[in-house]
Amino acid sequence: MIAAVVLAPLFFLPPLARGQDDQAPTPNPVPETSPAPASPASAPASTSDESPKPAPKPVPKPPSPAAPKPAAPAAPAAHPASDTNSGEATTPSGPVIIAPQSTRAGRALFDQKKFTQARPYLEKACNLGNMDSCGLLADFYYYGYGGVDQDYRQTRMLDRQACEGGSIESCGNLALLYEKGIGGARDYAVARAFYKKACNGGSIPRCSALAMLYLNGQGGAQDYAQARAFFRKACDGGYMLGCAALGSLYQNGQGSFPDPAQARDFYERACNGGEVVGCNWLGRLYEIGLGVPQDFKRARTLFQTACDGGFKPGCDELPKLP
C-alpha cells in the first residue's frame, strides 16, 4: 500500500547541456587550402588572450562524464599556417584527422579559453571538413565566446553540419536545441532521432535524455520499456543520473509492478557513484521503510549528503525526520 502513494518523481532530472567529444572524426583526408571563413562574422584581428564574454546560458553546463582531454600543445603563431606536409606521403598508422594542425591548434587554444585566437583555426579546419571543429564553432555562437554575438540559429546550423559529418556529440547538442526550441522551432520527434543517433554512437548521457522523451511521451508514443532500456544503457555506461532515474521507474512501477528492492539497488549505485539525486531517493526509502528496514539515522545521513551536494529536496527532508 505504501508503494501506491510514495512515488519518486522524475522531474528532478536536470536537462543536459552542450558538450563536445574529444575524439576526432575519421573521414578521408582532404588537403588544406585557404578557404573563406566558416561563419558570416569575420575573425577578430586581435591575437591577445581573451576570457569568454559573459553571456546568458539558457541551459546550464552539466555534470556529465567526459573523456580526458589530451595534453594541449604549445600555442601557435597568431596566423594559421599551412597544414600540408612536405615530402612524400606516408600511410597513417591511426585515424586520419582532417586539417590536423589547424584542428589541434584551435582545440588547444579553445581549451585554454583563448577564444579569439582559436576561432580562425577552427573556422579553417571546419571549412576543410573537420566536423569536431564545426562543433566547437557552434559553441562560439551558443555562448558568445570570443566576442561573437550569440546566434542560436547559427549554432543549430553548425551542429547539424557537424552531426551529419559524423560528430556524435554535435548530434546530441542538436537534439537538445530541438528539444528546447533553441534557435528554431521545438520538435520532440526530431530531438528523439538525434538523441538516438548520439546514444547509439556512444554519447551515454544522451541515452538518458532519450529515455526521458520516451517516458514523457514527447515526440512519439509513451513507451516505458524503451525508457527503461535507455536509462539502463546510460546507467551501465557510467552515467549515474541514469541509474537514479531507473530506480524511480522500479519504485513507481512504470512499465512493470513496483519493485522497491530494485529501486534501492539503483539508488545505491547512483549514490555510491556520486549522484546526490540517488542519495536523496535512497534516503526516502529508509525514511518510510520501503524495500529496506526503516532507519531514520541512515535516512538523515543520505538526505544530508544530498543537501550538501546541492540537491534542495534533500535539505527539505531533514526537518521532517523524527
Image: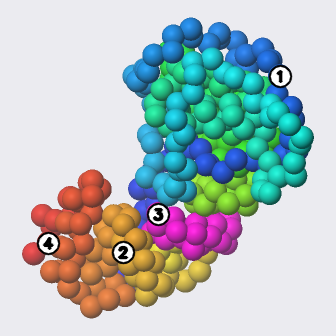
The extreme left residue here reads 322
The extreme front residue here reads 87
What element does badge 1 sit on?
A: loop
What element does badge 3 sit on?
A: helix
Amino acid carrying label 3: it is Leu
Q: Quadrant of residue 6?
A: bottom left
- In the picture, measured across the screen, residue 200 lies left or right of residue 148, that is right
Q: Which residues are magenta?
A: 222-245
| Residue at left offset 82%, top offset 28% | 32
Which residue is nearer to you in this view: 216 or 154? 154
Q: Quadrant of residue 31?
A: top right
What element does badge 4 sit on?
A: loop
Q: Which residue is mark 3?
A: 241
- The numbered mark, 3 or 4, whose residue comes first in the sequence reads 3
Q: Is residue 152 above or below residue 88?
A: above
| Residue at left offset 80%, top offset 18% | 35
Q: Which residue is mark 4?
A: 321
Residue 190 lies, in percent from the top left, at 74, 43
Is residue 115 highlighted in magenta? no
Residue 88 lies, in percent from the top left, at 89, 40
- The numbered mark, 2 or 3, whose residue comes first in the sequence reads 3
- The numbered mark, 1 or 4, whose residue comes first in the sequence reads 1
Residue 33: numbered disc: 1
| Residue at left offset 23%, top offset 66% | 305
- The numbered mark, 1 or 2, whose residue comes first in the sequence reads 1
* Label 1, label 3: how far apart the Cα atoms are: 45 Å
Badge 2, how many Cα within 10 Å: few under 14, some, many 20+? few
